[in-house]
Image: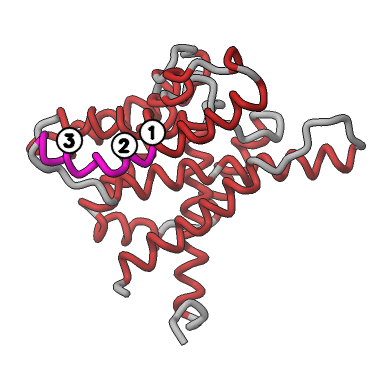
Amino acid sequence: MNERNKNILLFKGIAIFSVVFAHCHNNISMSLVEEILNQITINIGTIGVPIFFVCSGYLFHKKPFLLFWQKKVPMIEAWIFTGSLIWGYEVVRKGLDYANYVEWLLGIGTYLWYMPTLFLIWFIFELINEKYLIHATCVFLFIYISVIEILEVKKFDVPFLSNVICFIPFFAIGYLIQKKKDILRKIIEKCSIWVPLIILVGGIVYNQNKLIYGCRMFLLSALSIIFLIYRVFNSLKKDGKLSRG
């Protein structure tokens, strides 16, 4: 397995672990200690989806428009099939008025929100001319960090829009890493570990110890965690603890 695939698998493994945490927190009344542990669980659970979007951006390669979407047909089929099964199960348990089928598949108020968000981001990146895509991505990220990060993304309470605004910068950063990985790797390796630590702690404290989708400094805080994970991976590799056998 080459270095690129190994890194992607490691990050996806962390993301899966995080998503499990996101769905295991306690929603009932609890003691102070349990509330603290619960919040830690939620914070850990928040980083998984951003990692998945960074990986998706890193793996994104522009193709002729129709060819690109033809290759996504098996994913769409799996999306509809599994989503329909779970919708049917929920309807049997709770009645036909429990959830609108189309809204369920489109992720409006359901767990399937990730799929239309990813597909819309793919669509946006496919529309941009490849010649200008890197420049457009850099300009977008500069505007996002300068303006949107100051606001709370969740204020854009429009189906699909808030999710796309929240996660497209992670996809864009993954794409930039793919295109400029040698330059970015040098910058990351020279960057002091204290910089992301200060950003992360500052973001969590600023948001009252909560790291949730769309909160202020969410992008910078999540990127700080991803940076720290990457540095841990590198340290383990140097020690030979991530090598096969």
Q: What distance separates the C-alpha of mark 2 from that of mark 1?
A: 6 Å
Residue type at mark 2: give it. Ile
Quadrant location of the N terminus in the rendered image: bottom left
Vertical side of 164 occupied by 183: above or below? below
**Residue 76 bears which disc, if any?**
2
Instruction: Look at the numbered disc 1 and give the secondary structure of its residue.
Output: helix
Display colour scheme: secondary structure
Vertical side of 102 occupied by 114: above or below? below
Mark 2 surroundings: few (<14), some (14-19) or many (≥20) residues within 10 A: few
Query: Percent position (x, y) of residue 50?
Result: 46, 41
Secondary structure mostly seen in magenta is helix
Q: Which residues fall within the magenta stretch?
A: 65-80
Residue 244, picture quadrant: bottom left
Residue that carries the numbered disc 3 in the rendered image: 135
Residue at image position (52%, 46%) is 48
Check whether the beta carbons of the residues at disc 2 and disc 3 lie within 8 A of each other.
Answer: no
Residue closer to the observer: 217 or 4: 4
Instruction: Look at the numbered disc 2 and give the secondary structure of its residue.
Output: helix
Check whether the beta carbons of the residues at disc 2 and disc 1 lie within 8 A of each other.
Answer: yes
- Closer to the chain start, of discs 2 and 3, is 2
